[in-house]
Every structure is written in structure tokens, then in C-alpha cells.
Amino acid sequence: MRNVYLDNNATTPMAKEVIELIQDNVELYGNASSMHRSGRDADTAVEWAREQVASLLNCDKKGIVFTSGASEANNFVFLTFRDLIDEGYKRNRIITTTIEHPCIEETSQYLISRGYKVDFLSVDRTGKISLKELEEKLGDDVALVSIMTGNNEVGTIEPIKEACALAHKAGALFHTDATQAIGKIEVDVKDWDVDYVSMSAHKFYGPKGVGALYHRPGVPLRPLIHGGHQESGFRAGTYNTLAIAGMGEAARLAKLNLKEEAEYLWKLREKLRKGIEERIPNVVINGHPTDCLPGTLDVSFPCAEGESILLYLDMEGIQVSTGSACATGSLEPSYVLLACGVDVEIAHGSIRFSLGRENTEEDIDYVLEKLPPIIKRVRMMSTRKEQNNG
Amino acid sequence: MANSFMSQWVYTDTVKEHFMNPRNLWQDGEDFEADGIGEVGSLACGDQMRVGIKVVDGKIQDLRWLTYGCASAIASTSMMSEMAIGMTLEEAYHLTPTMIMDELGGLPEHKFHCSVLGDKALRAAIDDYLEKQGMPNPYKNKVAKVMCECKNVTDVQIEELVKAGKVHSFEELQELTGVSTVCGKCKNKIKEELEELLHIYSK
Ligand code: FES
């Protein structure tokens, strides 16, 4: 059976070159903190990787702190501000959005439960924040503004440069979780002038369990893991040399192919979108029509429930994800879609296709052949078919 | 690609089989004159179920169903339909979610309410049938389980209150029935049950 992996926003397969680099260096056992030769070899790998990541982001490599991934990087920033506020920092409010990844959403709730002040920016039907609302919410008590670059679920790209400028004007620092955007669109730290950026290697064909936080040298950062001098004392723990080197290679490749890949993915994405709209009646495209991560397509099929669609597609070798509650074990469907003002039922029937560099035109043709009968079948079983004029 | 860890499907083989080949589905345009129809669930929870039954000589002669729901909802209802056909109304009324789940070889814990829906829809269809026939409903109170011993309040009573939209919270339920106001040992059990019911019947 054909295997069509369309869940690249969940994770990507490692690039061939990344696998090779890791395999070639699997015997690189030195501790990158040691002064002797095997230590220096490992350190060379780590520093090489740091350069690649800095080059991809167009930032000062001294600002890169390797972490276990983006969840850690995001916690790093939020917990730094918790510490700052505890220390009596003159500003004590954080602004973020309603559509951040759970590692920010839930960290915010955790902070709120302990008495810290966090405000949330709403988004419109396309998943965009409003700069006007940001301006209104900003004040001289705001310490940090955190807005994701591109949303993992609907793909909407936020106006980071503009939002960052507003935050700076009000004297606040700015963080963006660029996990989904890196490797897909240009993330330019210098041009955007952002203070903190989170990322994760496995979203751009690198290994799992490794990521990084960029922080503008000099901005506040408090150690997340105490007990070692690694990463300038910000993040203790022996370097995961191979994973970091793999991330470096993934960053190098991402920079090399960024433009072509983005164009290619958008072409496939649009082919899929048009094909679905032509072949299936009554569909709703979620997210922003143009300001969207090139490989992301979130579609709702009213009167059809997402988990059923996902599993019927899985039987055909097509792997996607859904915003339906059923698939997650919670009772609520995707909070991102609900935050966009999408109807509960539409949210339950949402399917996210996230394309990657390994996908082909034939993959899309295959999906366009298999998907319509599945939707028809699920709708036929549905108590909701009266509402469905398709 | 090399992979030495082969996965199992998310649910049991029986669930998979019923999901792929659902039995007794209410086909479009099918000429099925139901003697009783029951519908439960809500779109808020992403599950809604409709069951239609044909009754001959006090037995379920045939059954059709539709669901807006996930794989385990589809499989549970399909399995329920196979079990219910041929049963007397009394037997059918005593079908429990656990019986359906057992036949399916189990469901993950968070999917339990999917099988609850199938069995509730079946009972609702029987209720509807009896009502349409102008017949008394001898089963309803028989299957009722006492939830609060001190106040003698049953699950059926609680369900009726939720269905009628009279109860939206535990506090409202306490006000109306006095549950958990005496010894209090029933509190957690009732809260759980109520949450499930509110979930199923919320609009
Ligand atoms: S059993 Fe309910 S109050 Fe005692």
C-alpha cells in the first residue's frame, strides 16, 4: 500500500543527510566540555551546529542555547520572566495569544494559577492577531510579549516584525515561538528585531529531542537547569552531541533550500486545496488564505467527524491529524479552531494536512482519489446528513 | 524504511472490523419504517446517535442506526445493533455499555462514553416505541440504579432531569433532589455520572 505521510507539522522524518551525518559520527563519544582531544572533537561538532542554526536564523551565534526542544525553549522564556517578576522587576505582565502551542498556553495557565498576570490576544476567523488589540493591551507594566510565528494547526503566519516593533515601543521584550515556521518560511532575527526565538529540530528534518532558544545577548535569561557551566550556565547537562550535530545539518539544509521548498510545498498545498474544493461539496478551509505556512492545509468537513476520517485515511496509508476531541481523549475539540471562532461541529470535523519535502504530486493525486469516497461514507453514516446538502 | 517496532491498530480487531464494515447502518433512501426512534448525544461532544427499531411480538425484529461520531462510536453502535436484534424489549433494555464493550474486546478508557451512547439511544428508541403504542414502560424504573441511598435518588431520575434541561450543575441537582446532602458518600459517584450526562445532553 502507498504510504503518504501528511503530518509533517507533528514531526518530520530526518533528512537523509542528517541520518548520514549522525551515522558517520556515532562513535564521537567525547564530552564536549572536556579539554582533551575527544572532548574538543565533540565541542567542534556542537559549535559547528551552533553556527548553522545562527546562520539559518540570521542571528548572533552567542545567543543560541541548545535545549531538548521547543517546549523547553518556551518554558525557558516564560520561567525567566517568572523569576524576574519574583525578583521585583518593574514590569509584571505578559501578553500572549489564545492560539499558542500548549507548552505556552499551559505554562501561562500555570503562571496565572500562581498569581502572575498573563493577557491573551484574540484572533480572527483566519487565526490572525490584531495589532490594534496588541497596542491597546500594551502598557508600561508589560514585561514580555510572546506571539507564535506560524500556527501549527491552521498554519496562519502572524505579523511578527510589526508586533515586535509595537512591543519594543512600549518597552517590552518580544518572544516568538517559531517552531513551525523555521525551515518553511524565512525567520530573520535581525530584520524582525526579536529578543527570543524558540525552535525544535524535528520539525525541520532534524532529530527529535533537540531544539534551541535564541536570546539576544544581554536580555534577561535565567538558568532553567542548574548544575553545570554548559551553554554559559543557562542550561546544565552534558551535550547531546549527535542530536545537536544533526540539528546543525538540518539547519544547513533548510537554509540551502528554503525558497524552492516553500514554493514547492505551496504548490502542492494549493493543488490539494483546489482538488478538495472541486471534488467534495460543503468544505470549510480554516486559517488564512495566503499568510499561511506553505505546507499546511486545515479543512473541515461538516457532518463528518474527524477521528473517523483520520482512521479511514490511515487504512489507505494516508496519515493526517484532526482537531476532533475524539482523537485526543478530551471532550473539547481543537482550542485553536475554537479561538478562531469556528463552530464546535466544524472543529470536530477538521483534518490537518501538513506537507513536507518528501511529498510528491502523486501523493496529492492519491489523496484526492481516496478522500472523497471516505467523506461521503462518513457523512452517509452521520445523523447530521440532513444538514448536509452535498 | 527500516523499523523494528511494528504498531498495533489503535483499537481491537473487532472494533476495526465493525468500523470498516458497520452492520445495520441506516442507508440513504432505505425504506425502513421505524416503530420507535431514539436520539442521544450532542454535537458539542462530537457524538450524536440515532437508533430506529422495528418491533414484532415484543421483540426487536430489526434495527437501523446513524452516528456522528468517532471510530469507537461507530463500532459500538454497530455491535449494539447485532446484539439487540432478536432480543425482547426487556432484554434490550438491559443491555449495558459494558456488555457492548466486552463484545468489542474492550475500548480505551476515554472512549467508554461512546458505547454509553449506543445503549442510551437504544433505550430511547424503546421508550419512544412504547409511548407511541400508548403502552406503559415497565423497564425504565427496573433498570434504575439508586445513586443516593439517603435520598433514594436513581440514575434514571437524574438523567430525566438533565434531559429536560432542569439541571445544569451539581448544585442544581442538589437543590432539586437533595442528593449527597446527608452522609455524602455518593458525592463523587454522582458528580461523575452527572458530568457524563451533561456532556451527552448538552446542546
Ligand atoms: S448516599 Fe447520598 S447522601 Fe448518603
Image (cartoon, coloured by chain):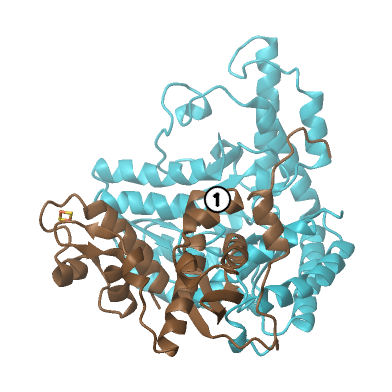
Chain colours: A cyan, B brown
In terms of depth relative to the viewer, which is nearer, B133 or A172? B133
Q: Quadrant of residue A297?
A: bottom right
Find residue A176 and report its horizontal and vertical position in percent: 51, 55
The chain letter for the residue carrying disc 1 is B
Q: Specify whether residue A14 is in view.
A: yes
Residue A372 location, x and y as percent? 77, 75
Q: Which of the 4 quarters of the picture holds residue B136?
A: bottom left
Quadrant of the rendered image holding ligand 1? bottom left
The quadrant of the picture occupied by the N terminus of chain A is bottom right
Q: Secondary structure at mark 1?
A: helix
Would residue B169 be found to the left or right of residue A356 on screen? Answer: left
Residue situated in front as seen by the camera: B130 or A38 = B130
Above/below status of A30 relative to A321: above
Residue A14 versus residue B198: which sits nearer the camera?
Answer: B198
Q: Which residue is mark 1?
A: B102
Residue, x 52% and y 29% (percent of image)? A231
Q: Position of residue B150 (x, y in %)?
A: 14, 57
Please tell me in which quadrant of the rendered image residue A267 appears.
Answer: bottom right
Point 25% across, 42% down: residue: A86
Residue A209 drawn at (x, y percent): 61, 36
Label 1 sits on what residue type?
Answer: Asp
Q: Is residue A42 left or right of residue A115?
A: right
- Please say if B48 is above or below A257: below
Of residues A247 and B126, the one drawn nearer to the viewer in this rendering: B126
Residue lying furthest left: B182
Q: Quadrant of the C terminus of chain A?
A: bottom right
Q: Residue furthest front?
A: B57
Q: Is residue A182 visible?
A: no
Q: Residue at x 51, y 70 (%)?
A: B88
Mark 1 residue's CB less than 8 Å from ligand 1: no
Please tell me whether residue A211 is drawn above or below residue B28 in the rendered image. above
